[in-house]
Image (cartoon, rainbow, N blue to C red):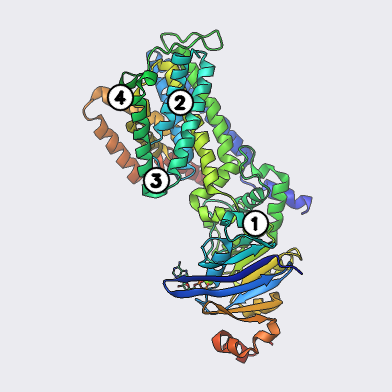
Amino acid sequence: MTMAAMNDAMTSAPGKGRKLGRDLAGLAAILALAVLGYFLFPNNLALLTRITAIALLVLSLDLVTGYCGVATLGHAALFGSGAYAAGIAAVHFGITDPLLMLACGILGGSLAGLVCGVVILRAHGLPQLVLSIALIHLFHEFANKASSWTGGSDGLAGIAPDPLLGHFEFDLWGRTAYVFGIVLLAVVFTILRLIVRSPFGMLCRGIKEDPIRIRAMGASPKLALMKMYVISGAVAGTGGALNAISTQVVGLDSLSFTLSAESLVMLVLGGTGSLFGALTGTIVFMFFEDLVSAANPFHWLTMVGALLIAVVLFAPKGLYGTVAGLVSRWWGTFR
Amino acid sequence: MSAIFEVRNLKRSFGGLAVTNDISLAMAPGDRVALIGPNGAGKTTFVNLVTGNLAPDSGDVLIGGDSVTRIDAIGRVRRGLVRSFQVTRLFQEMTPAEHVALAVLQRDGRSGRLFGHFLAMPEVMAEVAELLGKLGLRELMHRRVSEIAYGQQRLLEIAVALALKPKVLLLDEPAAGVPQSDTGRIEQALADLPADLAVLMIEHDMDLVFRFARRVIVLAAGTIIFDGSPSEVTKNPRVREAYLGSYANAGHAA
Ligand SMILES: Nc1ncnc2c1ncn2[C@@H]1O[C@H](COP(=O)(O)OP(=O)(O)O)[C@@H](O)[C@H]1O
Ligand SMILES: [Mg+2]
């Protein structure tokens, strides 16, 4: 291997610089949207924070579904476990420092990821989907029955987080929670961009397409998927903890089939296998839900259904995937 | 020399049909073996059995003297038994560079790394570029597999196997679907393999077989009917009868 050949191989690689550019652009977009949201909806920061927490759940789902091809309708188990872990730490163990609560949420989510991974990865396709549905119902029922810990159907109340970093109170307007959430989202997004592009991310893309080929290369698809499930649990747990800290309650709905199914809808809406797609889907769905359910509470699910059918039929790559495809083609012809 | 790879009394049948019927063979480091036989003789099934992609009814597989019969496909690869597929199995959305890089990283135990990108790993890229260069895929290394010709995909299939630096390499019809103009690249890549690697190649192109192999095994209806030197194979009456007659009569092998 000559040095010249090396250089040639490196320079003909599809823009490393461009990838870094997209990372920064993505980060800038998140922050710009966050600032925009802050000024457009100063009285609705709670909704924006909720969107941020759900965005973490959908990103987490994208890791296993979009990048690894795992079919699941039970992903809220990871989110809810994170939320309950953070909440229980605060209520029953007096761990009220928000960063420590966050750590508990991440741990709880990762553990739930491990458990769900062990069960769900035993099957493929439709049986896998059925297992995931069974799991979320089990998690839900378990939380319901363990009411001395979780508050049962009344929810876990009385979560009173300390000021963030000892300085920033979680105020009535939800400013601190909002900024906290956006920072978490930005950090998670950056880490995930690194992971999906790493050797491990490449391995997972290979597994999604042909696990037998991966085995013939000497790698274990099962092990890799387990690892991704734990990472996914950490991300969902971050979202759950954010939700517990910002709303100061944890309800059974955070551990529900409905939330699981909705997060899958959001992911498909935005586009699977892309972090930007996950974010787009969450934002569009949540705003759509907020707008339409306010205007017409009875028909809002019908509208969401219609939107979803339209996207699946006419933009199968999701909103983000389709727009990105159009833009890059446009860019290609006009350059 | 002791065997690096050995198969003892391997048997497998599908619904009463003995597709692999008591096969035994051993290979030493440096062996260059061609496994030939008519379509449906059980060649691919044999590869599936020894690599652990398919479970045998009975028999043993040994790598470096250790039985791997109870070890799964992944474990066998890690012990140095690597195969290529007769029908290309590649990742359509990934590039040749990504394929080879993934194999190199996996071989070095780094495929689980959560940060960094292979394009920024000079030692990985050096290997990727060299291997793909050897197989004439350098210009295409950053194209998606779905965009490159089938013949080139066949070459990539071989590149992935070679990137794993096996001790025993099983190639299932590597030249099938590769245009005549490109089979030279396969031959060159095979000629450049480490001398102590044991290679078993299933191939229909007899020119390739006779140039490559120092030993030919003929499989017919699940059993080995010949195991010997290339010069003997065309003279063997059983082989002529089963399969090779046309070639021998045409004086193809000389
Ligand atoms: N999974 C299977 N189930 C049933 N029959 C099979 C299976 N795999 C292979 N066979 C049969 O075994 C025989 C040998 O096939 P194969 O090993 O692919 O032959 P070759 O590679 O020599 O052309 C064929 O008759 C084929 O139909
Ligand atoms: Mg075959």
* Residues at marks 1 and 4, CA–CA distance in whole angstroms: 52 Å
| Residue tagged 2 | A82
Amino acid type, label 4:
Leu
| Chain name for mark 2 | A
Counting from the top left corner in percent of width and height, residue B211 is at 70, 77
Q: Are marks 3 and 4 in contact (CB under 8 Å)?
A: no
Instruction: Establish whether ligand 1 lies closer than 8 Å to the Cβ of label 2.
Output: no
Frontmost of labels 3 and 4 is 3
**Picture layout, residue B186 above or below residue A258:** below
Amino acid type, label 1:
Glu
Q: Are marks 2 and 4 in contact (CB under 8 Å)?
A: no
**Picture layout, residue B13 above or below residue A183:** below
| Residue tagged 4 | A291
Q: Residues within 10 Å of mark 4 (few under 14, many from 20)?
A: few
Question: First in sequence: mark 3 or mark 2?
Answer: 2
Q: Are marks 1 and 4 in contact (CB under 8 Å)?
A: no
